[in-house]
Amino acid sequence: MNTEQGVEEPVDRWLTVPNALSVLRLAGVPLFLYLLLGPEADGWAVLVLVLAGFSDWLDGKLARWLDQTSRLGALLDPAADRLYIFSTLLAFVLRDIVPWWVAAGLIGRELVVGVFLLLLRRAGYGPFEVNYVGKAATFNLLYAFPLLLLAGGDSTAAEIARPIAYAFMLWGGALYLWSAALYVYQGVRALAEARGGAGREVAGA
């Protein structure tokens, strides 16, 4: 977790290759939802999701290779991941691909983390640093979603994809909740330190 003082932050740049990829990934969210809920063109929806997952990996690599990390990119990248996860879960519930309680658990995780982000911002802290558990959870879920679409049919490919999709979904969901627990733990410690520091300042005054 970064504080707003004394920590080197990414450069405030807008026009970078990684940011352009993140914007394109965000633009794919409404297209993805339309394909799933409108014509139910699952094949095209899978293609959009696969391209989104690849661009998620690529923009991080390019940001490091080209030395183009930026504050905007640090916001766009996780925002795009969360939007894809949220929109996919919404569409899957509406189409009865996953049960509602699975979606409720993962979306509830986002609400809890969001509340802690607001509390930390008020205490003078920046956003959470993305940990490897959270990144692994996102990758697992982005692999699980297209496989769940493929598993919905009656073909041999669907039978092969089904157990793999469920494995990625269960593992990704567990990691997603575990990463939230780590964020909450970090947030509670940071807020306790902030309150302790404020108390010491009042006592010294």
Image (spheres, grey):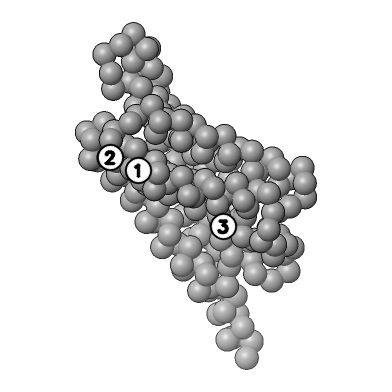
**How far apart in space, not on screen, are marks 1 and 3 (Cα)?**
22 Å
Disc 1 secondary structure class: helix
Residue visible at 38% across and 17% down in the picture: 161
In front of the other: label 1 or label 3? Answer: 1
Residue visible at 32% across and 37% down in the picture: 36
Residue 33 - label: 1
In the image shown, does 166 or 61 lie closer to the viewer?
A: 61
* Residue 123 image offset from top left, x and y in percent: 53, 73
Give the quadrant of the N terminus.
Answer: bottom right
Residue 37 - label: 2
* Residue 167 image offset from top left, x and y in percent: 40, 23
* Residue 171 image offset from top left, x and y in percent: 43, 29
The disc, 2 or 3, on the residue closer to the chain's N-terminal end is 2
Q: Amino acid at mark 2?
A: Leu
In the image shown, does 84 or 204 lie closer to the viewer?
A: 84
Local crowd at mark 2 within 10 Å, few (<14), some, or many (≥20)?
some
Residue 94 - label: none
**How far apart in space, not on screen, are marks 2 and 3 (Cα)?**
28 Å
